[in-house]
Image (cartoon, rainbow, N blue to C red):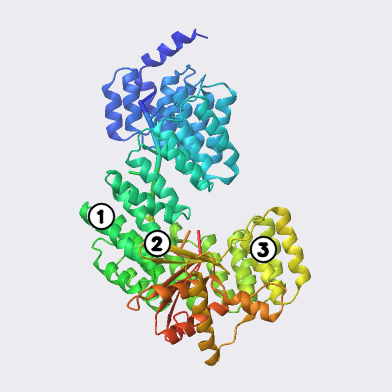
DNA sequence: TTAGGGTTAG
């Protein structure tokens, strides 16, 4: 009707009363509007600013702009769009974006960032792809978030490499922000060497780059690397901050080295970042993960401004250290103190029940959650998995299976995995097979499900099925995770694999093992060969068992660690029956406490008894 | 008008 330029101008001279009847604004906003005679660009900006937190009002403004039949400048839409992104309403932002004529790179960046910040990584990647197809040139602001999106999703791995190639093509690979994200991506892909190369060749390694690398290592199972970087940072003269210390503490928790963890906390004191609730929680969690439950209890009582994370950490701490009663009474104390549990707290409570086989109490907590009106603590899929674990491991496999069938949400691999784990413990081949069938569909690449099922067949002597399953794994390229145990001694980590002879002290370690076995056998020890899942003769089975990684680690610690310290072993998988018995005997023979952390809980061995009461 | 790093469970 009008040439575009004129129409645009018209918008700004539309008298305000025309707008007012349909808009329901606060009195403050209305005053603001009345003060302006016409809706000038400044007035419009002001109007948007005053509605920035109100999605409804923003939508009304957009609606008015559209129904006024006037063309809208990109600038105005940009304002609206950034507001919607800030409010997390990505679908509305996307609608606005699609209405725009040739949006500039800045807007593409804004949208990608919005998607990533709201965990919509696929959408972020597809926007980038579209940008690429349309020939819009990305800039240094585009890539940090594109790479982050690729890092977060396994499906986007290939896209990550493409993005890296693009970064190089546009000459942006020396931009600190871009390179930091690339580094994180490669750590997550398990390419630590390449991540390290990117870090070494960074022009200026600032605090954020150090932190990103240390945190990425700590979060992706490279605790030793994280700690060595932390030490290197200290000697390079860069002052650590709370983020650095939290990552270092988390690495210590993973590695089970609380002495080093306390040295890290000393630095927090020097830097004046102790009494920071996040750092204090990280320290608490570190002691929990090292099995120092008394130290953790004391620290917990000393933390002044405890938050829900402190309480959850402590509840879980009791649960995994075999003190379920304390976990549950702490939960009651928390509620008496007027704190509301969140979904993690409930996971801790349910896992406390699960570790001790407290079925009726578990049901009570689960029902309490289900009846809660608060959306935040309605049971999620993880809570269902916890219940299946509790029921199944307590021997109520049928009940667990019926529970799964009655679930209001679709069971995922976590839920079926819990059932399979329980079936393996109780030796229920039939139900195990059923769970495994579901798991091979839902999570075909996960080695541990194949291994669990294969072990069950082996225990039942069904070697035909074992071989079939192994073939299937080979075909799919699913590789079993090798079991290892590690012991920290004098700041170094000694890692042992089954049958390992690579340690410099191997000879005396094996001698020590021999003499231990002799003593144990005289006390009535018989090896539990049902933990060896290979079709070999009994004698050979005994040999394989006798060199399990945890046994080597314990022998190493007995030789090296002073008698005033307990023996601490960290294992990456679950402990087997025979090693559990072995550890009980050793704790009795050697009069040493053995604190062993397996994949999901602690075993504190003292004088021939384990804190798990042989239920795990 | 835009950018990179953090704690709690299984």
C-alpha gap between disc 2 and disc 1: 22 Å
Q: Is residue A171 left or right of residue A237?
A: right
Crowding around mark 2 (Cα neighbors within 10 Å: few <14, some 14 to 19, many 20+) is: few
Residue A399 appears in the picture as rendered = no
Disc 1: which chain?
A: A
Q: Is residue A453 above or below residue A276?
A: below
Quadrant of residue A543 within the rendered picture: bottom right
Comparing A233 with B5, the one in front is A233
Which of the two marks, 2 or 1, is nearer to us in this view? 2
Disc 3: which chain?
A: A
Which of the two marks, 2 or 3, is nearer to us in this view? 2
Q: Position of residue A415 (x, y in %)?
A: 59, 64
**Of the residues under marks 2 and 3, which one precedes in the sequence?**
3
Quadrant of residue A410 within the rendered picture: bottom right
Comparing A140 with A362, the one in front is A140
C-alpha gap between disc 2 and disc 3: 34 Å
Quadrant of residue A532 within the rendered picture: bottom right
Badge 2 is on which residue? A492
Badge 1 is on which residue? A268
Image point (30%, 71%), residue name: A295
Q: Is residue A317 left or right of residue A124?
A: left
Image point (29%, 48%), residue name: A234
Q: Give a yes or no on whether discs 2 and 1 share a subunit.
A: yes
- Mark drawn on residue A450: 3
Image point (41%, 39%), residue name: A200
Q: Secondary structure at mark 3?
A: helix
Q: Is residue A317 left or right of residue A302?
A: right
Q: Position of residue A427 (x, y in %)?
A: 66, 77
Crowding around mark 3 (Cα neighbors within 10 Å: few <14, some 14 to 19, many 20+) is: many
Q: Give a yes or no on whether discs 2 and 3 share a subunit.
A: yes
């Amino acid at each position: 009707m009008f040439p575009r330029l004129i129409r645009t101008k018209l918008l700004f001279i539309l008298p305000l009363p025309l707008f007012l009847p349909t808009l329901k604004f606060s009195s403050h906003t209305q005053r603001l509007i009345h003060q302006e005679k016409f809706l000038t660009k400044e007035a419009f900006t002001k109007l948007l600013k005053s509605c920035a937190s109100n999605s409804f009002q923003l939508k009304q403004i957009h609606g008015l702009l559209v129904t006024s039949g006037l063309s809208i400048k990109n600038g105005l839409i940009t304002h609206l769009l950034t507001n919607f992104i800030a409010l997390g309403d990505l679908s509305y932002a996307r609608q606005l974006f699609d209405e725009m004529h040739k949006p500039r790179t800045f807007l593409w960046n804004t949208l990608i960032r919005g998607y990533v910040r709201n965990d919509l990584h696929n959408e972020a990647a597809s926007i980038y792809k579209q940008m690429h197809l349309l020939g819009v040139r990305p800039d240094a602001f585009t890539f940090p978030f594109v790479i982050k999106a690729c890092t977060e999703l396994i499906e986007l791995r290939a896209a990550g490499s493409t993005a890296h190639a693009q970064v190089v093509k546009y000459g942006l690979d020396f931009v600190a922000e871009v390179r930091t994200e690339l580094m994180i991506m490669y750590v997550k892909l398990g390419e630590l060497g390449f991540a390290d190369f990117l870090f070494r060749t960074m022009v200026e390694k600032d605090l954020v780059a150090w932190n990103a690398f240390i945190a990425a290592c700590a979060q992706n199972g490279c605790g030793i690397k994280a700690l060595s970087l932390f030490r290197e940072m200290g000697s390079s003269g860069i002052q650590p901050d709370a983020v650095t210390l939290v990552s270092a503490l988390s690495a210590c928790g993973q590695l089970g080295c609380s002495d080093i963890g306390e040295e890290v906390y000393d630095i927090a004191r020097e830097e004046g970042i102790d009494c920071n609730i996040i750092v204090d929680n990280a320290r608490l969690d570190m002691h929990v993960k090292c099995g120092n439950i008394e130290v953790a209890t004391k620290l917990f009582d000393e933390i002044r401004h405890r938050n829900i994370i402190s309480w959850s950490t402590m509840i879980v701490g009791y649960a995994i250290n075999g003190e379920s009663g304390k976990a549950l009474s702490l939960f009651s104390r928390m509620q008496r103190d007027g704190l509301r549990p969140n979904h993690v707290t409930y996971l801790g409570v349910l896992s406390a029940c699960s570790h001790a086989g407290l079925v009726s109490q578990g049901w009570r907590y689960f029902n309490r959650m289900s009846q809660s009106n608060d959306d935040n603590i309605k049971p999620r899929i993880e809570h269902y998995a916890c219940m299946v674990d509790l029921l199944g491991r307590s021997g109520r496999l049928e009940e667990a299976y019926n529970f799964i069938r009655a679930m209001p949400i679709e069971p995922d691999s976590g839920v079926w995995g819990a059932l399979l784990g329980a079936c393996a413990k109780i030796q229920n081949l039939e139900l195990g097979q059923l769970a495994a069938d579901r798991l091979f569909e839902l999570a075909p690449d996960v080695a541990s499900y194949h291994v669990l099922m294969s072990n069950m067949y082996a225990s039942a002597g069904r070697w035909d099925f074992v071989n079939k399953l192994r073939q299937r794994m080979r075909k799919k390229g699913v590789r079993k995770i090798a079991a290892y145990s590690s012991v920290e001694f004098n700041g170094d980590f000694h890692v042992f694999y089954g049958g390992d002879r690579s340690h410099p002290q191997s000879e005396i370690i094996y001698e020590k093992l021999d003499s231990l076995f002799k003593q144990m056998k005289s006390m009535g020890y018989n090896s539990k060969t049902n933990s060896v899942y290979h079709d070999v003769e009994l004698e050979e089975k005994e040999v394989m068992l006798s060199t399990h990684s945890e046994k080597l680690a314990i022998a190493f610690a007995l030789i090296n660690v002073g008698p005033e310290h307990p023996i601490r072993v960290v294992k990456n998988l679950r402990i087997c029956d025979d090693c559990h018995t072995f550890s009980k005997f050793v704790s009795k023979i050697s009069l040493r406490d053995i604190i062993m952390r397996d994949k999901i809980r602690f075993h504190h061995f003292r004088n021939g008894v384990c804190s798990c009461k042989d239920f795990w």
